[in-house]
Structure formats: C-alpha cells, structure tokens
Amino acid sequence: MMTTVEEPVGLDVDTLMAFVLRAVDEVGATLNAGLVVMGDELGYYRAMATGPTTPARLAHDTGTAETYAREWLAAQAAGGFVALDPVSGEYTLPPEHAVALTDEQSPAFLPGLFQLALGTLADTGRVVGAARAGGGLGWHEHGPDVHVGCERFFRPSYHAHLVSEWLPALDGVVERLERGARVADIGCGHGASTVIMAQAFPASTFVGSDYHAASIAHARRRAEEAGVADRVDFEVAPAQEFGGSGFDLVTTFDALHDMGDPVGAARHVRSAIADDGTWMVVEPMAGDSVHDNLTAVGRVYYGFSTLLCTPASLSQDVGLALGTQAGPARLRDVVTTGGFTRFAQVAQTPFNQVLEVRP
C-alpha cells in the first residue's frame, strides 16, 4: 500500500522546498571549510595557480593520491571555487581566486579564515555543554587551528593597513613613533601586530602581552625571526594586569570583545597610558544594531561570536560578553566607563573598524 504524506494546512510547499535546498547548500558550504583547509595544506591551490590541471596532474604535482584530488576538484567546481571545462576535463583556478587562496600577503587571503572556522566548529559540542550550564570556553582550551587560523586571517590585513592607513589616521601618533615611543600591544596573540609595528618604527620600543602562554612563546619566536627582539618584549598577562606605565601608544587588535572584563581592561589602560597618549582599538566591523549587521561579514562574525568569542568572555571573571558585533556605541561605553573621554572611529575595512581613544 502506498502512503502519502499530507502537508499541514496553509504550508507553502514551494517555500519549504526552497528552504530545504538552501539548507543543503549550507551543508555544502560547511563541508567546504574542510576542503579549503585540505587544499591549502596539500598545496592544491598553489599548484593550480600555475595553470589548468586534471586530477592526475594535480596529484602528481602535489605528491598526493589521485582519488582524493579527483573528488576534491569536483567538490571545488560544484562550489564555484574552480571552473571545469566539460570538453577538456581540465579544472582552472581563476587568477582572482588564486590571490584569495594562495597569497598570504594579500588582505584578501582566506584560508586562515577557513582554518579558524574549522577549528571553531571542532569544539561545538563543548560550547553546547557550556550553553546548557551557563559557562564558557576559554581561548586556551581550543586547538591550534583556532590560534593559527586567527593569526593567518588577520595578519594580512594588518600588513596591508596598519602602518599605511590605520596608524596615520591617529592624530600625531606616527610622528611620535618615528621619534621613539613606548608602545603596549595588549591581547597580542602570536605577536603579528607587535612585530609589524616594530619593523616599521625602529626608534620605538614595544611590549606585547596576552594571557595565553603558548601564544606568547610563539610571539617571541616571531620577534627573533624578524630581527626585532632587541626592541620587543612579550609578557604573559591578562589585559587588566599588563606591566608598565607612561605608554605613548596602547593597541588592542580584535581582542577587546573577547575579554571577560573589558571595562577593567580599559581602566588599566587608562592608568598605564601617558596623559597625552592614544589607545588604538581595532575591532570587527559592526553597526550598533543587529539589523545593521545582517550582512555576509556580520553573519560570519555572529557565528564566531556564538561559538568562540562569547564563550571566551564567559570563561573569564565578570564575563561581560560584548560579542563580536558589539558596535561603536557599546565600545564607546566600555572605554568611557574605563576613564577615557575621547572616542572616534577613524578608519575601517570590510572586516575591521579602527577606533581612536584618548584620555
């Protein structure tokens, strides 16, 4: 006997099926995070940047199994990352896609973002448990894909914008750095921002700090490799406790919203900064309302906020949980409550907003 399924009265079947197909596409996009990381690690994208290829050729060029290259190429073609010529059977990586997938110096470089996403998704089960218990999950509790992916995603933007655009947008800061300034980079992670500034301003000295000891060890190695270790120190310390005082410039890159007590951090920055100093706060691009952030970038950041940044804040004392899309109004409230009086958005990119904060 054949059974028919009756749809609930008033249900639009076309709308239902359109949503189902959209959801299937979402599953494909989720799996593609792993495929992009795979292509990055196996060198598939770099090999394809030289010209059209076939599964056999790609496998030969990368020293991998042809069966994996075959399925990976088909998946990438289905997702529009590469193009398939149905006549020749060759796959091509468009040059614009090649920049985004192979050039680690380009601000458009994307594999770090996918690596960060994949590492974040790996801990979904632990976040679900934290949500049930009302707890958090610290940055230090995640695997290396989160730490390394985060740096690989943000570092190209810092390379492209920090020295050429962001620092010049601050009143008088570049001149002070050129003369010789004392700089504290709090929440520095692997030290990419600290090292970039030290390389650009040899007359200045820098102290980077982060509560994550493994990241600080990595940052010290980076400073040695860059030849700036004589002017750059790193310390393991939370934002409310970093050492030193009288800093001409304090910087915080994509970290304020992750802090459990950003107001406490602002108070400590105020006590450590010179009276005529500047605090540069770089945060994810966001508007003040959820409606403002219903964009492709906002969607990604809300995802990270739910699975990574908010749990990180909740794992710390206070646990204010600003969220990755805090917006200028909430950020202004944080720094003014912490004792600062001047606040302005001075620069932005599709991914970041740059805030100038002064006593």
Image (cartoon, rainbow, N blue to C red):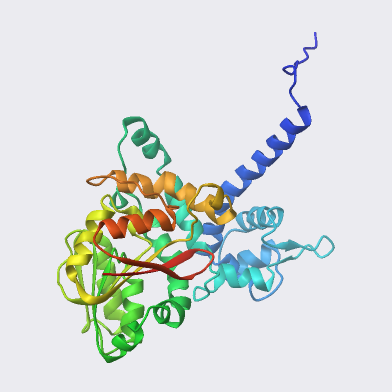
In the depicted structure, whether residue 20 falls above or below residue 81: above
Q: Is residue 188 visible?
A: yes
The x, y position of residue 45, in whole percent, is 59, 67
Task: Please state if 317 lies on the left or on the right of 17 as rendered.
Answer: left
Res. 212 visible in picture: no
Q: How many marks?
A: 0
Q: Which image quadrant is residue 203 in? A: bottom left
Q: Residue at x 30, y 82 (%)?
A: 198
Whole-percent x and y of residue 72? 63, 55
Q: Check the image and report above or below for 227 versus 252.
A: below
Q: Name the spot of residue 6 as percent of width and height, x first.
A: 75, 15
Whether residue 289 sits left or right of residue 357 in the image: it is: right
Q: Depth check: 228 or 282 in front?
A: 282
Quarter occupied by the C terminus: bottom left
Image quadrant in which the N terminus is located: top right
Residue drawn at (42%, 70%), measured in percent from left and top?
A: 155
Residue extending furthest toward the front = 341
The structure residue drawn at horizontal position 25% and vertical position 85%, both measured from the top left corner, is 204
- 70 relative to 233, above or below: above
Residue farthest to the right, as pictured: 87
198 relative position to 17: left or right:
left
Which of 137 and 286 lies nearest the eye of the viewer?
Answer: 286
> Which residue is at a point 55% across and 66% down the rendered structure image?
63
Tell me residue 70's x, y (percent). Answer: 67, 56
244 over 30 or under it: above or below: below
